[in-house]
Amino acid sequence: MSLVKARNNVSVSGSGSATMVFAHGFGCDQTMWRFLAPAYEERFRTIAFDLVGSGRSDLTAYSREKYDTLHGYADDLLEIIDEFATGPVIFVGHSVSTMIGLLATIKAPEKFSAQVMVGPSPCYINDGDYVGGFSREDIDELLETMEANYLGWSSSLAPAIMGAPERPELRKELTDSFCRNDPDIAKHFARVTFLSDHREDVARSQVPALILQCTDDMVAPRSVGEFLHRAMPVSTLHIIDNVGHCPHMSAPTASSQAIDRFLAQSLR
């Protein structure tokens, strides 16, 4: 087994001349794509993986120095693409992974034909006219609560992040996923995630982007999607009628329909 495959628990399926790469959000793993990724296996080579420190990745590969910014994860993504992708890459990222993908498209734009951003946010903290959804005090309190009682924090916050009030099994799944993570790694990753600010990077990505948001998302409000749509050189904003931050799980059909329309237009 290659070092990259073992490090990120890389899974490859499907067949096609182009590749779709799926990257999960904070507290999750690649299994969260099981409602969406199979729909593309007949048309594309599909790759799913776990961010280092999450899922079944190699926890010994976690370096606080390397992963003290999202650039470390972007470098991993490019290594995965180099080793496992064929043809142009369509990157599908959720939450924090949307920014990991964005950074990768800036570093190596020639590797990408499109990027799909599910619940993206370049900055979670309100700043002047920019509405990220949280005050700095909100984020500090979130991180302090997490530091004091990670399992309790996970059990209370994960169901709210999932939303999907009519799908209690999904709320439980996300809670269980949060709780399975190594607490020390999760705390560090949370700090890197929620204190990151990539607003100045957004306009540097020339790869066509679909910004996929929900009507009611406590993590990434609509104002964030509108900011991204204005700032990105080539972008499409699509709003899904859904409660929560994980439409690829709670509204997979609406998500895939939006992705299909976007790909039909951007890959012509």
Image (tube, grey):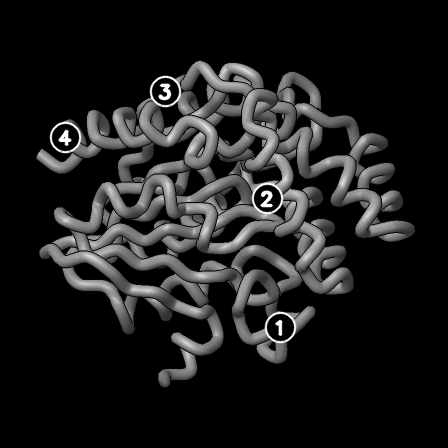
Three-letter amino acid code at the position of disc 1: Tyr
| Residue lying farthest to the front in this orientation | 169
- Residue ID at (48%, 49%): 24
Direction right: furthest residue: 148
Image position of 98 (left or right of 129): left
Q: Nearer the viewer, residue 221 or 131?
A: 221
Above or below, 61 against 11 in this view is below
Q: Mark 1 to mark 2: distance in Å?
A: 24 Å
Amino acid under disc 2: Glu
Q: Nearer the viewer, mark 1 or mark 2?
A: 2
Residues marked 3 and 2 touching at CB (< 8 Å): no
Labelled pair 4, 3 in contact (Cβ < 8 Å): no
Report, in whole angstroms, how far the alpha carbon at label 3 lies from the one at label 1: 35 Å
Give the CA separation, mark 3 to mark 2: 26 Å
Question: Between tags 3 and 2, which lies in front?
Answer: 2
Q: Which residue appears at 70% of the width and 50% of the height?
A: 190
Label 4 and label 3: CA atoms lie apart by 15 Å
Q: Secondary structure at mark 1?
A: loop
Residue 264: image tag: 4
Name the mark on residue 175. Answer: none
Quadrant containing the N terminus in the rendered view: bottom left
